[in-house]
Image (cartoon, rainbow, N blue to C red):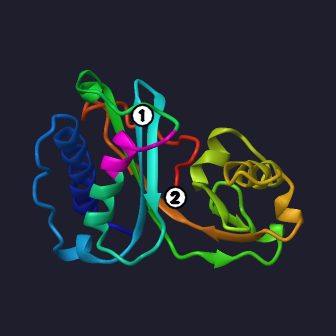
């Protein structure tokens, strides 16, 4: 588990990076000390007034959490292909959520997937898609629906998980801003690009 202080610092890093990018100024220096220096994967989800506005992540644990969160925040506000870039007028209404990604575990059987606990990564023929654990809960999906949507996210047939696609599960530590800290801190969102 990440300390509350480190959680708050990661949320501030994400907000500062988004604000700097949108306003065209250099991002402030990122702290890589203590728990923020540990390598890890993360996703940054941005909502504006409750609606998803961007979600980008990095799943490999090969860079410091602080740097990953900073980079993903900028990408979520500017490079999510599903949305136009975030504008300055939207900044006060943004709600930021961070999902710290645990280790990937190869799935031997769909029975190894627990909805609400595990996120999914599917890959086949160079195409891959990922959905965060909170997505299935938010949309009230069962296991098969979660698998089908993850395959669809990868641009694969919805039953690719039955046709030889590789599946990994992971857990995530999910936290967001408190109400009034720039937004409502709404959990969820339909996953992000990897």
Badge 2: how crowded within 10 Å, few (<14), some, or many (20+)?
some
Residue under the image location 80 percent in, 48 percent down: 145
**Residue 46 on the magenta span:** no
Q: Secondary structure at mark 1?
A: strand
**Residue 80 on the magenta span:** yes
The CA span between labels 2 and 1 is 18 Å
Residue located beneath label 2 in the image: 194
Q: From the image, which quarter does the N terminus lie in?
A: bottom left
Which dot marks residue 82? none
143 to the left or right of 82? right
Residue under the image location 57 percent in, 54 percent down: 132
Q: Secondary structure at mark 2?
A: loop
93 to the left or right of 106? left
Q: Earlier in the sequence, mark 2 or mark 1?
A: 1
Asked which quadrant contains residue 89, the reply is: top left
Asked which quadrant contains residue 140, the reply is: top right
Residue under the image location 26 percent in, 65 percent down: 67
Q: Position of residue 63 (x, y in %)?
A: 33, 75
Residue under the image location 79 percent in, 51 percent down: 148
2 vs 1, front mark: 2
Q: Number of marks in the image?
A: 2
Q: Position of residue 194 (x, y in %)?
A: 52, 58
Stretch in magenta? 73-81
Q: Position of residue 161 (x, y in %)?
A: 82, 63
Residue located beneath label 1 in the image: 47
Q: Is residue 96 above or below residue 42?
A: above
Q: Position of residue 46 (x, y in %)?
A: 40, 39
Q: Main secondary structure of the magenta part?
A: helix
């Amino acid at each position: 588990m990440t300390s509350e202080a480190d959680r708050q610092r990661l949320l501030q890093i994400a907000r500062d990076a988004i604000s700097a990018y949108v306003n065209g100024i250099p991002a402030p220096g990122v702290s890589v000390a203590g728990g923020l220096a540990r390598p890890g994967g993360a996703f940054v989800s941005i909502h504006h007034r409750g609606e998803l506005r961007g979600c980008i992540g990095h799943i490999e644990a090969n860079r410091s959490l602080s740097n990953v969160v900073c980079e993903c925040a900028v990408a979520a506000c500017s490079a999510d292909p599903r949305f136009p870039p975030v504008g300055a007028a939207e900044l006060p209404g943004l709600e930021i959520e961070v999902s710290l990604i645990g280790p990937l575990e190869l799935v031997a059987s769909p029975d190894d997937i627990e909805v609400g606990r595990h996120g999914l990564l599917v890959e086949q023929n160079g195409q891959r898609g990922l959905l965060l654990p909170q997505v299935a809960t938010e949309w009230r999906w069962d296991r098969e629906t979660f698998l089908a949507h993850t395959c669809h996210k990868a641009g694969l047939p919805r039953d690719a998980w039955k046709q030889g696609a590789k599946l990994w599960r992971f857990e995530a530590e999910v936290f967001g801003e408190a109400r009034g800290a720039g937004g409502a801190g709404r959990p969820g969102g339909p996953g992000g690009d990897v």
